Image (cartoon, coloured by chain):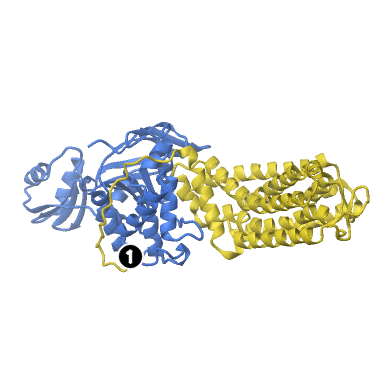
Chain colours: A blue, B yellow
Amino acid sequence: MSPVIELAALTKRFGAVTALDGIDARVTGDVIGLLGPNGAGKSTLLKCLLGVLAFEGSARVLGLSSAQNGAEIRDRVGYMPEQEASVFGLDAVQLCAFVGELSGLPRAEAIQRAHVALDHVGFDDKRYQPIESYSTGQKQRVKLAQALVHSPELLFLDEPTSGLHPRARDEMLALVAELPRRCSCTVVLSTHLLPDVERVCDHAIIMHRGRVRFVGTVDELRRGGRAFAVEVRDDAERLAGALASAGATCRVGSPTKLAVELPGDATTALVFDKAHELGLQIRSLDVERETIEAAFLRMIGATA
Amino acid sequence: MSEPAGIIRDLGYERYAGSRRAPSKRWRVLARQQIASAWQPWWQYKTAIAIAVIVTAVFGGLMYFFTDSSMFRGFRWVSNLPMTMSDGAVPASLQWFRRAAFVVSTATAATTIAGDRESGAFALYVARSTRPVDYIVGKVAAMLVLVGSITIIGPLFLALLRLGLFDDTTVLVAHLWIVPKVLAVGALTTITYAIVPLACSALFATRAQALAVWAAYWLVACSIVALLGALTSSWFAAFDPASALDSIIDQLFGLHMVRRVRFPLDLAVGSIVVHVTVALAIISICVRRAHRRGFGDA
């Protein structure tokens, strides 16, 4: 699969502040989570990818250079902003048709596709009422529809579940998860809500302080710690000490249980070998899947 | 809107594979949308059109039915000779068309860019291939069409009516100058009433602020300047665009208006040019800044 986004030594400075610090990444996937705390550089990265901001290094989106083909990229990319975004006085159909025309669609095609996009996000009634009268959930759907109207190949969604109540959030995430199949587009989901990523994303990018800390699948992220839950017959403390001296990270939970994170290329054989050396009997050894929150904290905590 | 969770309707979404409008022509989309938005509520463009139609009908009627009657008090030729209704109706109507233009300026131009900032529309523009120059050209073009249709079409109709009232072709030809003069005044009025309020709207982040400042500037500050100019009989009044336009009308049509400051034509035109140039600079700076801040927190 060819990468949708390729970054090489991407650097963006605002005066003395380095917002993006030599980022290298090749990103593939259907729904990609872009994670990071506030100020991590997510929005700056999106602006660079869309060719809105000048930068050093190289960034390619859908095979096009962001520095040289920004306008062409923006015609092929959809963007759903986090904050409210509409035009006063327009209803949902008018807004979607208007932005479709701004993306270069002929007027008749833009109007037709506005209806299709609104249907696609499940927006039936009220589409002819002014957007100012919509609820938060309805506004989010209209923002998603306007991002889809010009049939983008790549979709940037900035906090799409922000401010939604649980049911509307479920519906929005269901829509997002279905987008690659229904619309044949790749989705980049920028969010700080880790459960959203866990639920719909297959790949993730973690950013922190202007640097990329992780690029890969969500499964790789969650088992990246190579963590195991070990139960011994007795004296977990001794086994933890021996494993720690071999480079593992251990946390003793009870006299018979400990959590082990193996170092480098070590395998579970290390645990059995050490137990054998100490004359300890291992009762069970289970893979301990990290929560995505724990994986995220581990990624940004390593350098925090 | 009340679909159950996870239910997605598929009405045949397919990728668009046809041709796209060239990016350099997309300002037309913005211009057309702006004109359409101004047309929708009755209190914006429609009200201004209604005023312009009434002004045209009243002054056309005065010209037609009271051709040789004396013009209103205060209207005289620069030679101090009295003016007939047929001669004075066209220049006298111009300030009334300006009032109609003020309605469009206030209801539309003075709030449009601030409205886009307030509603977050710039996020939509930035994420597409809309450059700041496309946005500016689109908005300015729309305002020129809206204001120009008020300040040019009506006066032009009255000028042609005036020419039609001449019985003698030789006299008619001798008075053809009225058409380019009406067009010149219409053009200067149009750029003033389209671009200056647009700059006001670019300066502020909400429509209410922009509207308040525009009204304060035009109705209060400019009136004070005009009053001071009239009291001191000085060119100081040229700082007021409306006074500058009055002075241009007086000199182009050879009028002598009592209680109206008269200053050189080049100074009056210069005042309009400076106002419009400063306004365009403000629009350019503010729109580029809004474009840079279009989305995200960076």
- Which chain hosts label 1? A
Left-right relation of A185 to A70:
left
Q: Which of A10 and A153 is in front in this view?
A: A153
Q: What element carries label 1?
A: helix
Left-right relation of A240 to A39:
left
Residue lying furthest right:
B80
Residue lying furthest front:
B168
Q: Nearer the viewer, residue A160 or B146?
A: B146
Position of the N terminus of chain A by quadrant: top left
Residue lying furthest bottom:
B2
Residue A134 position by quadrant: bottom left
Residue B185, x across and y down, in percent: 74, 46
Residue B263, x across and y down, in percent: 86, 45
Vertical position of residue A75 compared to residue B102: above or below = above
Vertical position of residue B128 compared to residue A68: above or below = below
Identified at 89% across, 60% down, the residue is B73
Residue A228, x across and y down, in percent: 16, 50
Amino acid at pointer 1: Ala
**Label 1 crowd bin: few (<14), some (14–19), many (20+), radius 10 Å:** many
Vertical position of residue B209 compared to residue B16: above or below = below
Identified at 36% across, 55% down, the residue is A145
Visible in this render: residue A195? no
Residue under label 1: A168
Left-right relation of A226 to B3:
left
Visible in this render: residue B13? yes
Vertical position of residue A39 compared to residue A168: above or below = above
Residue B30, x across and y down, in percent: 51, 48
